[in-house]
Amino acid sequence: MILEVKDLTLRFGGLTAVNKVSFGIEEGSIESLIGPNGAGKTSLFNCLNGFYRAQEGDILFEGKSVMKLKPHKITALGMARTFQNLRLFKNLTVMENVMSGMHCRTSAGVAGAILRPPSQKAEEKRIRDVAMECMDFVGILDKKDRLAKNLPYGDQRRVEWARALATQPKLLLLDEPAAGLNYDEKMQLIELIRRIRNERKITVFLIEHDMGLVMKVSEKIFVLDYGVKIAEGTAQEVQNNPRVIEAYLGKEEENAV
Amino acid sequence: MKDKQTGLQTVVDKKAKKIDNPFVELIDKFYVLFDNKRVRYSVLAALLAVLLYLPMITSMYFMEVMTNVWFHVVVCLGLNIIVGFAGLLSLGYAAFFAVGAYTTGILILHYGVSFWLTLPVSVLMAIIAGLAIGGPTLKLRSDYLAIVTLGFGEITRLAARNLDITGRATGLVGIERPTLFGMAMVKINHFYYAFLILAVLAIFISYRLQDSRLGRAWKCIREDEDAAEAMGINVVAARLLAFIIGSVFGALAGSFMAIKMTAISPESFLFTQSVMILLAVVLGGMGKIPGVVLGAFAVVVFPEVFRGIGKYRMLIFGAVLLVLMIYRPQGLWPERHT
């Protein structure tokens, strides 16, 4: 288990967004979290990477609790994420965006910046090399000098993936990676997710609304409804689970017209 | 999750529009050319040669104005680190050079310390001041941060006005000027060169910081603090460093100002001073080093050029600024030209 969530509960005042959720992510797998709108999926993600502080339960990343850690520490430990509604550094170039991911893997400070000793120069080169490789991996290397905000939507998504990959994660959290993508782009995304796992040995955990994509790519699926985990299993198992059908389509009523 | 940038940046983003004017286009072409390192270095070398030679041929008045320009270049570049690079709107920057000026003034006047030895103390005090303003405001963004920094600036000035050690409202008078290699620093030319060296250092350090891991982290924070944190950037540390380095720039300029003026008072560090510096940064182009230098030059030289028209000059200055901000809100020399 690379990630274990135990009885996680997150409340906003009187509203329980995540209610005693427990699950585990197998190292080297591709797993998904699905659920109707407002089920608490993104809230759960925000707990995992430290944006939200859950009130109860525990989150173990590689056996260590990350409940009390700040987001940048969690990223440094090897858990990276992307955002549902793109959160790129819009006025920076694609290159600068992706280079930011290497921040937690490097160490030059003020003195290094001003004096530029050989160690700092070597580090800068390493940052550039990793950024180039990540951009190449997702296929946006030719746009590296463009401003992020000037790219078409599909390419902006790629910048997010490259930026997350540049943090050199062990576990990658993708929050609705297919949102707003067309059919071809979705097919490329499936391919990319598989390549991330197979070639880079990164575990992938994603939230997704596109059932076709989820069923194709995931080895295991968790279903969340009203903050509660209602099912888990393979695509087949989840699809035939009456509680899941109920959550998505509503209950069949006896006297339905 | 809040999705808020600095207030200023948002306004700039919204208003920046393309103006079809051959003159403006020509300037923009020069700006692009200037981003090339070789072009930049040749232009700067030529400029520096002229600036070094300047004291031989011009009047004392001109030297006074130019010295003031270099002083403003240093403080504007200091504020640019906070506002331009890290996107932290600060309205109390005068407090930072007050810290430097008073530290130097007090040490020379009350303790007879050599000026050169007051500089490291000044830096130390600047670090403390940077932490004092940066620490409690870590959670604040944009407008809210601006209000607190405004308060900080006023508190510093009022403290100086009411403490015995800072000489209350009279301030510190008769700060002794130092000697350098046996030569007394008394003439305006000496200060011209001193501030020119400071300005060159400030420009050099600003460039080095801008193209560094830290500089990139600042820009990411400016764009989106939450995303920066998620990318593994320690936002708290980076924000504090921006305040500290900006503060050190200001304090060192303040220390040199103390010995140039030989007298400092709370009235030297008014809110309007902070605003003028912020104005220079915004006018020149937030985050763009040559832009900020240009802005510093503009806010010092413009009122001098129009000194002839007496009391109306600030009115005209205001009108010109208004027109500039309407037609070129991204600044004279903006960070990006797209």
Image (cartoon, helix red, strand yellow):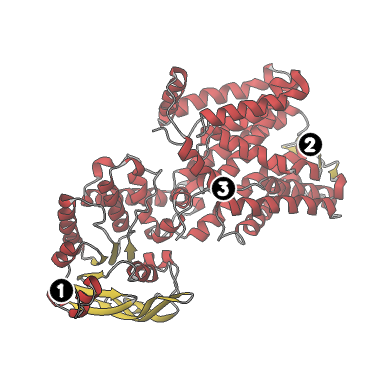
* Residue at disc 2, secondary structure: helix
On screen, residue A191 above or below A214: above
Nearer-the-camera pick, B254 or A84: A84
Query: Given this view, does label 1 or label 3 mark the residue nearer the observer?
Result: 1
Query: Given this view, does label 1 or label 2 mark the residue nearer the observer?
Result: 1
Amino acid, disc 3:
Ile
On screen, residue B130 above or below B28: below
Is A5 on the left or on the right of B74, as rendered?
Answer: left
Q: Position of residue B77 (x, y in %)?
A: 58, 40
Instruction: Say which residue label 2 marks.
Output: B261
Q: Position of residue B160 (x, y in %)?
A: 80, 51
Nearer-the-camera pick, A253 or B260: A253
On screen, residue A204 above or below B147: below
Q: Which mark is residue B82?
A: 3
Mark 3 is surrounded, within 10 Å at the Cα level, by few (under 14), some (14 to 19) or many (20 or more) other residues, namely: many
Does residue A26 show up?
Answer: no
Q: Chain of mark 3?
A: B
Calculate the distance from the C-alpha at mark 1 to the C-alpha at mark 3: 53 Å
Q: Position of residue B266 (x, y in %)?
A: 80, 45
In contact (CB < 8 Å): disc 1 and disc 3: no
Query: Given this view, does label 2 or label 3 mark the residue nearer the observer?
Result: 3
Q: Which residue is depicted at the point 49% across and 45% down?
A: B209
Amino acid, disc 2:
Met
